[in-house]
Amino acid sequence: MYKLLLCWRYLRTRYIALASIISVTLGVATMIVVNSVMEGFSVEMQSRMQGILSDIVVESHSASGFYDPDRLMEQIRGVAGDQIEAMTPTVHVPAMLSYRYGETWMTHPVQLIGIDADTQSLASDFGKYLLHPENREQMSFELRNGGYDTQQANAGPGSPDRSELASAGWQYRRQRYGRERQQREWLEQLEHSGQSPASEHAGHGDAPRPIREAHRPGADASSRGAVVPASAEIATVPPPAATPIPVSDTTNDGEAGNVQAIAPSDPFAAVAPMISEYDPEQETSPGAVLGIALASYRLPDGRELFLTRPGDDVKLTFPNAGTPPRAVDARFTVVDFYESKMSEYDSQLIFVPLKELQRLRGMIENETGIGYANTIQIKLRTGVDGDEVRNRLQRAFPPQTLAVSTWRDKQGPLLAAVQMETRILNILLFMIIAVAGFGILAIFYMIVVEKTRDIGVLKSLGASSRGVMGIFVGYGVSLGVVGSGAGAVLGLLFVHFINDLARLIGQVTGQEVFDPSIYYFYEIPTIVNPLTVSWIVAGAILIAVMASIMPARRAARQHPVEALRV
């Protein structure tokens, strides 16, 4: 009992030990926060990678891809059919996205992916990253009649305001292109009457207002489109809108295609075929799903500004499958947005119908009607070892023919870098606790020297060497338990409120702490692993105990007579 009483007395009166407790607390808290963030980052990143790549990816070495993907999938089922849950063919090709925002053409380099709407969501997690609830249930490239989510899935307090999406879909499309049609008709009437648009607008208060004036600040939200932001300068007389001009449609081999050209006001008019007699108020082009970062950006006040919305037409330019390749330019209608919350994907990927992309690139044989694909994604059944299935497929399909890999193989360098960073950070941060251990060692030596006479009195009263040693070891255990316990509580609280703290720091400093364009995610992902927290706490206590053993042994070896002489 006397050992516990003395430990408690030293713990209460020796305020110098508070420095060691604080060191242990900060070390434990920092390690818990870092490990939770790194674990969350790793798991979220792997989940989103796997959602795009599926468990197994079979790729063609040829730029034109492999012929008849359905036949190849049957061969794959013959090798590992009992372990496969779903498969889907895809076509990947680099492309250039362009769309008009106001009087400006926005362009982005993108990765264009042709997918099968019926099977893509079965072979990957593609469907759950779409904004429209019906598309999450069953993917479709048809334009919906509104109903798009105006908040992120599982949105937190810092989620952006997406009220602009409330009217997206057919309602928005008819309003926008109807307004452009009215303006064109108005300009044509002025040309026939021989009057200039400026004079006509100045003399008639009831003339149709130009498109850009309809977006003046304070205009009713229902009347606004995605053509010009509300903050844009009001133009009294806008330039004429781009007018479709019928031309002979061409695909990669010169055959008739499903495309149409743009008026000279379009900078891409020379290579932009489009459909003649195309009525955007009543029909759409083939559908496209855009990564949400390609069409929007977040404002400092928390709102998300959309440069294009579901219902807008965009233009995609990409190479055909011929030799040498030639540019193919086609129009698509935005039908939904893809939001994986991983910036690398959201800012690069566009999904279009597989058959349409095959047709535009010349990847369908005219005689048979069978197309080409360059990738097959395979989803395995739960519990199946992906490496084992990969090895079986590699033996069945030599590497000279097809490249077979797991999603981990394709992202191996990135995953290895994350694991290496976690290990290095743990080593560096554990040194903080080690420094606290040396502090405990120095403090205990001071206490032993200071309490030499007290140690002599205890031993003369009958205290054993083991009992004296137990006093100081118990004191070290107490410091470790208090410091690591406080550190665990502090670390868990910090992890729980880490996104709120990041937003607060961003508001105070005026600079975003966690930039999604760098770190992939819109919020800091965290996962608390109880096992990791346990070994961190146990390691801190162990260091405190080891630091107290040497001073305790010195105190236990002292002779009572010599100690009383000091």
Image: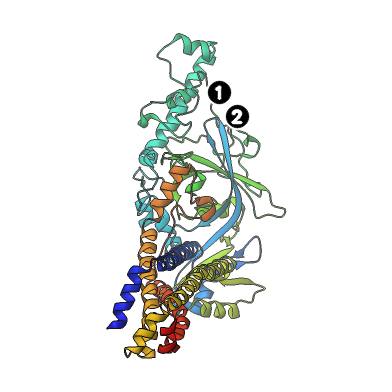
Residue occupied by mark 1: 239
Residue 302 position, x and y percent, is 41, 41
- Pick whichever, 20 or 461, lies toward us: 461
Q: Which mark is residue 265?
A: 2
Residue 488 position, x and y percent, is 37, 67
Residue lying farthest left?
1
For the C terminus, give its image quadrant.
Answer: bottom left
Query: Can residue 289 be seen in this snapshot?
Result: no
In the image: residue 378, left or right of residue 362: left
In the image: residue 420, left or right of residue 486: right
Residue 232 position, x and y percent, is 49, 27
- Mark positioned earlier in the residue sequence (2 or 1): 1
Per the model, the C-alpha gap separating discs 2 and 1 is 9 Å
Query: Can residue 301 be seen in this snapshot?
Result: yes
Q: Residue at x 48, y 32 (%)?
A: 227
Colouring used for the render: rainbow
In the image: residue 395, left or right of residue 297: right
Residue lying farthest top?
203
* Residue type for callout 1: Pro
Report which quarter residue 250 is drawn in: top right
For the N terminus, give its image quadrant.
Answer: bottom left
Residue 382 position, x and y percent, is 41, 75
Report which quarter residue 7 is drawn in: bottom left
- Position of residue 376 relative to residue 113, above or below, is below
Q: Tag 2: Cα neighbours inside 10 Å, few (<14), some, or many (≥20)?
A: few
Q: Residue at x 58, y 72 (%)?
A: 404
Disc 2 + disc 1, Cβ < 8 Å: yes
